Amino acid sequence: MYKVKCALMRGGTSKAAVFHYNDMPEDKAKWSDFLLDVMGSPDARQIDGLGGANSLTSKVAIIKKSDSEEYDVEYTFAQVSLTDRVVDFKGNCGNISSVVGPFAIDEGLVEVTGEKVAVRILNTNTNKLIVAEVEVENGRAKTEGEAYIPGVPNPGSPIYLGFCNPEGSVTGKLLPTGNVIDYIETSIGKISISIVDAANPLVFINAKDIGLKGTELPDEFTDEKLKLIEEIRSIAAEMCGFASKEEATKKSPAVPKSTIVSASADYVDLSGNERKKEDMDIVVRMMSMQKPHKALAITGAVCITAAASIEGTLVNKLMESSSDKITIGHPGGVIDTIAQSNGGKIESVKILRTARRIMDGYVYTRNEY
């Protein structure tokens, strides 16, 4: 067995194993095998590891103090597949980004002055800056508070994440294909999609084009619809240059992320709350590792915000109004984003999250690394 120091933290609506960079295997070529071992993958139940049998709880954050004066810490995100021997390092996770500031403060990686710390985070997956505004109490990140976010049952201390210059995070281009709309041939015929890369690349699909209302909850997606959505995502992955459409599910399962969009509408969320059309600007149903997301990826919210500002995209066409503040309806409720723009270019998108440390200790892997 191999014993490694580890923390388990909830960030937003996701959960991750969190490691110090120096505690990871020295040989980076072994990182994937190590993290599969940690999570208990491949196994849909992840019964022999830390994973929670869901893509939202099969995530990893690797954090180190930065050597650069421009950043306080550097953070690498990993999405560990449940069923395949795949660890995807291509994109970032916005929810898990919210654990980085509190972890860095509590582990002494940043200097604490005052009652709030702005932690400058370099996400190494996308080479983008994230600024996490974290409240501090007695020298440690504050956990308790009154901030509620949909998808999390308990309130917490507010963490404001600012995703800076999010355009072209993975592909290097805001519009990876150069087009606001692309027309693709699928098993149901020709449909239109929009591929936008901001914080993470997303492929947007109009719900009506694939026979959906757009307000479906996760358990209402049939296997047939999920197969079609993955077919479309795989075509988009090839268009982004990530993998051939035949190999995209295995070689690039996390990006681009499939995102079903529709006009604002009344619906009942996963907690049984009635959500009203007038309280949102757009309705979104996002996929995570080929399964319906129970809320919304935060990088997805950033990308939706960017897509809304680009005339002609599917998102832009469905928006009833144009504003720097956007309210997005998702299965867990609604989320607000605030964009800061300069000359038509989005300089940052700010989103409220909460996070907390659940466990400290050691994880024991089956093999040596």
Image (cartoon, grey):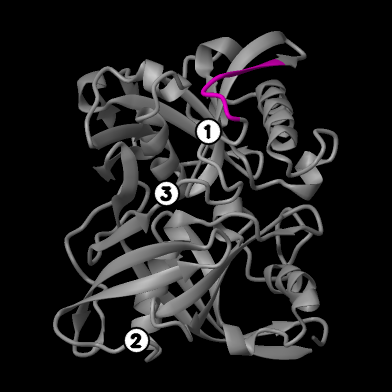
Q: Earlier in the sequence, mark 2 or mark 3?
A: 2
Q: Which amino acid does label 3 sit on?
A: Ile
Mark 1 Cα shell of 10 Å, populated few (<14), some (14-19), many (≥20): some
Q: Position of residue 303 (x, y in %)?
A: 44, 40
Q: How far apart are marks 1 and 3 (CA)?
A: 18 Å
Q: Which residues make up the magenta segment?
A: 178-184
Q: Is residue 205 above or below residue 63?
A: above
Q: Label 3: few (<14), some or many (≥20) within 10 Å?
A: many
Front disc: 1 or 2: 2
* Image spot of residue 235 (x, y percent): 73, 29
* N-term-proximal mark, 1 vs 2: 2
Q: Mark 1 points at which residue?
A: 218
Q: Is residue 116 above or below residue 286?
A: below
Label 1 secondary element: helix
The residue that mark 3 highlights is 298
Q: Are marks 1 and 3 in contact (CB under 8 Å)?
A: no
Amino acid residing under circle 1? Pro
Q: Which residue is drawn at 68% across and 68% down?
A: 39
Please, what secondary structure does the residue beneath circle 3 have?
helix
Question: Which residue is under mark 2?
Answer: 110
Q: Is residue 232 magenta?
A: no
Position in image of residue 61 (x %, y %): 54, 71
Using the rendered view, name the quadrant where residue 94 is placed.
Answer: bottom left
Residue drawn where x is 55% and y is 58% of the image: 126
